[in-house]
Amino acid sequence: MKNERTTIVATGVVVGIIASMLVYFGNPANMGYCIACFLRDTAGGLGLHSAKAVQYIRPEIAGLVLGALAAAYAHGEFAPKGGSSPLTRFALGFFAMIGCLMFLGCPFRMLLRLAGGDLNALAGLVGFTGGIYAGIFFLNRGYSLKRTYKMTAIEGSLLPIVALALLALLVAAPAFIHFTKAGGGPGAKHAAIAISLLAGLAVGALAQRTRFCMIAGIRDFILFRETKMLWGFIAVTVAALLCNLTLSAVTGASFFKLGFAGQPIAHTDGLWNALGLFLAGFACVLLGGCPMRQLILAGEGNSDSAIAVLGLVAGAAFAHNFGLASSGAGPTLNGQIAVVIGILVVGLIGYLNTYKK
């Protein structure tokens, strides 16, 4: 158990440093790694939404899936399976993304925003913890999306194949692929393709081996008083913080800015920051893992998680096509309505799939 905790903490340190260094190499500030943001950018790159500021096929996403696939194959853990309430998982992924884009980041970015000095992320952390508590309420009462079934190897390999196709499209850059123009928004800020891909492969492999998950740290502590994943959660934040401070000292650029106002790609509405990640945390507990964990599981051959990822992508496209996503100016009315609807829908999903023990 002690060795397992040490491995998880070491993984957290490496992941935190990689995320911080990705900003140094060109990714948006406090967004070295954000699954929600990168899926949103990728959806835009494929033309699924028309928000020109956030369009770029992010190699980190493909790297996560392929890194997890390689690690799973190497250790005999590639196990194609699925068939557990796929449309329900799609809906949960959809609304998890709606919550993330209200906050302007996934749970992973919440940690990176804290490490960059963005105190608005504290409201997100409170909401995220509350959403996990809401999900645990149903878990303790027998919530289940029913069993999975063994699938064919090709079924389990479809999302990794899509990941390879996305890389090919990024490199080939055919006319129908959309790229945010320089200076036009977060989509124009990115590390070199090779650096981003290598970072994704490394994080994907490490997360596969350690079962790393932003939900699991808080959920397991509440349910079982198990702290090993929570220490990994803390390690990401501390490592990214120290790396940001070091980069600031060495380069003279600002990789750390403490406060609420003027934070990069963030808003200061504490209530909706909290409610956004409440929805995301609630939905992800019922899914069985955070957005990053869904990508890792998809790399292992889990088609249910692949369906959840498609739900996340659809949620990102819908949010930007219909004005649900927040901006630095704050949340939109449409987004606020969507988050409230999302909380009600996820609560209904929890209720309908809960059976007394």
Image (cartoon, rainbow, N blue to C red):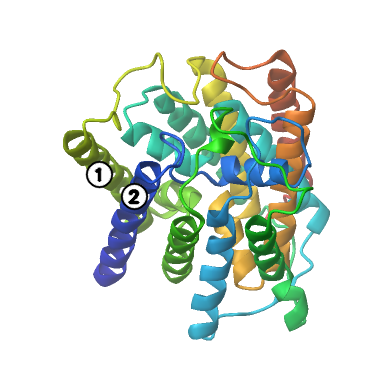
Look at label 2 and name its amino acid: Gly
Q: Regarding mark 2 in the picture, which secondary structure is present there?
A: helix
Looking at this rendering, what residue extends furthest in the right direction? 87
Left or right, 308 with reference to 31: right
Q: Position of residue 7 (x, y in %)?
A: 30, 67
Q: Looking at the image, which is closer to me, 35 or 92?
A: 35
Q: Does residue 339 sit above or below 209 in this rendering?
A: above
Q: Looking at the image, which is closer to me, 6 or 357?
A: 6
Q: Does residue 336 sit above or below 299 in this rendering?
A: above
* Separation of marks 2 and 1 at Cα, in angstroms: 8 Å
- Label 1 CA crowd tier, 10 Å (few <14, some 14–19, many 20+): many
Q: Is residue 273 visible?
A: yes
In the picture, the disc for residue 16 is 2
Q: Name which quarter of the figure residue 116 lies in.
A: top left
> What residue do we see at 29% from left, 28% from top?
254
Q: Is residue 351 visible?
A: no
> What residue do we see at 30% from left, 44% from top?
240
> What residue do we see at 29% from left, 50% from top?
235
Look at label 1 and name its amino acid: Cys
Q: Name which quarter of the figure residue 262 lies in.
A: top left
- Label 2 CA crowd tier, 10 Å (few <14, some 14–19, many 20+): many
Q: Position of residue 288 (x, y in %)?
A: 60, 55
> What residue do we see at 59% from left, 48% from top?
285
Q: Looking at the image, which is closer to me, 3 or 293?
A: 293
Q: Earlier in the sequence, mark 2 or mark 1?
A: 2
Judge depth for marks 2 and 1 and give the one in front: 1
Left or right, 304 with reference to 129: right
Left or right, 92 with reference to 26: right
Q: Looking at the image, which is closer to me, 8 or 261?
A: 261
Asked if marks 2 and 1 touch (Cβ < 8 Å), the reply is yes
In the picture, the disc for residue 243 is 1
- The quarter of the rendered structure image containing the C terminus is bottom right
